[in-house]
Amino acid sequence: MPHPQTPVDPSPDSRAPDSRAPDRRAADRRGFLAQVLAVICGGLATLPPLAAGLWMFLDPLRRRGAAATFLPITELSSVPDDGIPRQFAVVTDRVDAWTGFASEPIGAVYLCRQKGSDTVEALSATCPHAGCFVEIESQEKCFRCPCHNSKFIFDGGIVAPSPSPRPMDGLECRVEKNGGIAVKWQNFYTGIAEKVARP
Amino acid sequence: MNTQPQQPTQPTRPAGKPGLLGQLADFFDDRTGYRALMHEALYERVPGGARWRYVWGSSLVFAFMTQVITGLVLWSSYSASAQTAWESVYYIQHEMAGGWLLRGIHHVMAQAMVVLLALHLMQVVIDGAYRAPREVNFWLGLVLMMLVLGMALTGYLLPWDQKGYWATRVATNLAGLVPLLGPSIQQVVVGGPDYGHHTLTRFFALHAGFLPATLVLMLVVHLSLFRKHGLCARQPITRPDAMFWPDQVLKDAVAMLAVMAVVLGVILMPALRAMLEGRPIVPGELGAELGAPADPSLPYAAARPEWYFLFLFQFLKVFEGWGATGEFFGAIVVPGLVMGIMFLMPILGRWQLGHRFNVAFTLALFAGIGLLTAMATNEDYTALWADRGSFADVEKLLEETGGDTAKIAAHFGNDTVQIAAFQGRAKKLEKIRHSQSFLDAVVQAKADSARAITLAGRPERIPPAGMLELVRNDSLSQGPRLFAQHCASCHAHIDPDDPAAAVVLAKASAANLHGFGTAAWMRGLLDPKQVAGPAYFGNTAHKDDDMVNFVQNDLTDAATWKPADVEAVIAAMTAESGLTGSGLAGSGGKAATKTPNDELVNRGRALVADGDRCGSCHTFRDNGVAAGSAPDITGWGSREWLVGIINDPTHERFYGDSNDRMPSFGKAEPGSAPILTPRQVELIADWLRGDWYRPAGPGH
């Protein structure tokens, strides 16, 4: 293995002070207070930009996402009762730092209704493995994640072996009296076996 | 694996068996030789001992490092595009934690750097530190100075506010004056034929990329040459030599701390003042200003370069009247010559006389810059201390004569001495007026900036199209401007409770629209003493018409009109406008003000509709009066009604044929566009009604 073998000049201090210069050790002793003061002053002078920089750089830690709320997705009549999930866009107002977007698609859910049922199952389209967008594989009748080939059956159950640590994330879903479908839109931490909602 | 032989002990390695930390230090020293480097860096001999006059260079390096640190973090939140630059800077300044402080340090330190540059340059020239063998380092220093000024110039644009935008337009237009290549240079710098996204991306790349990278390279050479030649000591050397560390470092560190203290002081001074005056401290208002978003369609009379370029701005005025040649001469030739002489200084300095010339030239240059800056400041702010009242006679005579020289001469009986004296004072008055309009523009700019910042804080946030769209659709921002441009040549808009209002009001030739639609306005209209006054019909063609007669004769007849009836009519009319109570729409007090009770409103509506009263002329709701004899007052003062009358007062719903001079702003003549767009008419109506966004204040 190569190793640094820098030859060291036996007298690196080639510009040693001549007789006119004060003795360095004596200067060190005399200048101890000066050294301490210099370090303190220099440190104090550098502190404000560093502190202000760190303060602002860590600003994202103060930010919280929108609280999980029920968002209207579609009508019951738009979800056929054939047991095959359909993809729907989640549309809501969104704030990105300073910009406010009114009624913007912010993600997608899969809605699925069984034969003759009036209840709807909702699955987040986000893969629990690494957060890619899970697609429907209509020929194989399953969900497939394009990133690492996680497969899930239509109720979200995992198809082993899978890189995904858990089944697809179900979302709370309710059918309103007027036939509207609302889903509680949430994001979950990916890559872990437990389903934990992001704050 | 480790077959490395024992390295020879360096002079700086501590004696004795090293501890764990010492072993680690040895490990790195063996592989990097950092101790020798540190030694080299710190133990520089300072001939004649440490001095305060040597601190400027180190302070500049410190200031630059501060700019690098703060600039990098600002970069992490800045977004360079015409639709996001102002917005992201707003977000940094007003919403991000500590953003105001970071931006404040970056902004003020940039100015401190210019001052430190001047001091460093002066010290080097006075000490003759440019002489052989240090010529190249002096030239490098001049290049470094231009790089710093370049960064100041490019950084000014980045917030994309009115100030930066207009200053940059001027600066880039001046660059366009360079013969032959000028227009191409300008177009390359601007990023196209017009100012926009690519102006920002290019200026940002210059400001945070090209210029600082070049500066760092130059600085490394500058510092290594400085070390190679050693410090140019002040002669004669009378004191013993000292080491750079710690003697000179301590002085440098104290200077750095002082610079930082001044910078923080400038940022925090307004906070201290607010605290002493008992006002709340708003962190977003500290540090660097953020003007209203850049708007190429809006004149900006408060445009001035940053103070350290003010001398150049003033210098260009010397060449006024020479056209582009003069500007080319003032902005490019003269500064170029000055830089040329400075580059020649090391050569000239070989002779004692040349050195004296250099010192004199530098001092004269700074004196000239100081003088020009003072002149520029005086011209802009002279109205603050000049006594305009003492020019009242001049103002009066100028107004009477319309500035006609023959008439003025006649006024003084053709006495040339008096005429000359008058003309001198007239010139002074003109300067005061110019200064006043600048100061007014500054006040307006501050108000626009505050309004934009208020709007940016709405819960709906800034639309994706950017802040400018929001400002352009804000009735409080646009209403006064549109009113001044299109309405104010006849209509006044003056608070009648303001004592100064009466004087101005008399000059208006149509109704005072301040508070139009409110009970107070209606009460004035129905006041026999006011209806024929300047605030209502006094200066219009309607001053002897039926309405004035009615208010002066019928309404004063206590048998038919009891005071309570008039109050009922006022309640009914404000119910039409929707501006119930005393306030204007959404003026915060709306919820608190009492809505008139329905019974009063209903009684008033009956009186208004009555064919023997208002309904004898006015159409009102379903009273069946045919349109044409007087304006239909159904929905009087409402947004829809105002939009209608501004669009077309000659419509039979309003004044019809008896319309007095008011243009139909929304009605296009065949083959031409209307004077105002539908949106502009709405903005005027909303502004008159006081309908604009107000942030929920404390207690709401």
Image: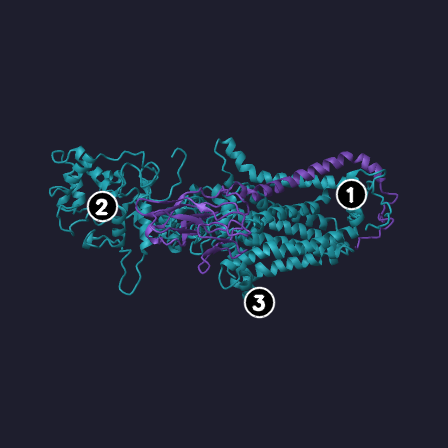
Image coords of residue B654 (percent x, y): 21, 51
The hue of chain A in the figure is: purple
- Looking at the picture, how far across and down is residue B62, in whole percent? 67, 45
Which mark is drawn over residue B181? 3
Q: Residue furthest right?
A: A19
Please, what is the three-letter code of the amino acid marked with disc 3?
A: Leu
Label 3, secondary structure: give it. Answer: loop
Point out the frontmost of discs 3 and 1.
1
Q: Amino acid at mark 1?
A: Ala
On the same chain, marks 3 and 2? The answer is yes
Please tell me which of labels 3 and 2 falls first in the chain: 3
Helix, strand or loop at mark 1? helix
Q: Which residue is mark 2?
A: B635
Q: Are marks 3 and 2 in contact (CB under 8 Å)?
A: no
Label 1, label 2: how far apart the Cα atoms are: 86 Å
Q: Nearer the viewer, residue B649 or B621?
A: B621
Q: Is residue B162 above or below residue B19?
A: below
Using the image, name the chain to which the residue with label 2 belongs: B
- The chain that appears cyan in the image is B
Give the Cα distance between marks 3 and 2: 63 Å
Which numbered disc, 3 or 1, marks the residue that appears first in the sequence?
Answer: 1
The residue tagged with tag 2: helix, strand or loop? loop
> Of the numbered discs in the image, which one, if any, rests on residue B455?
none
Chain hosting mark 3? B
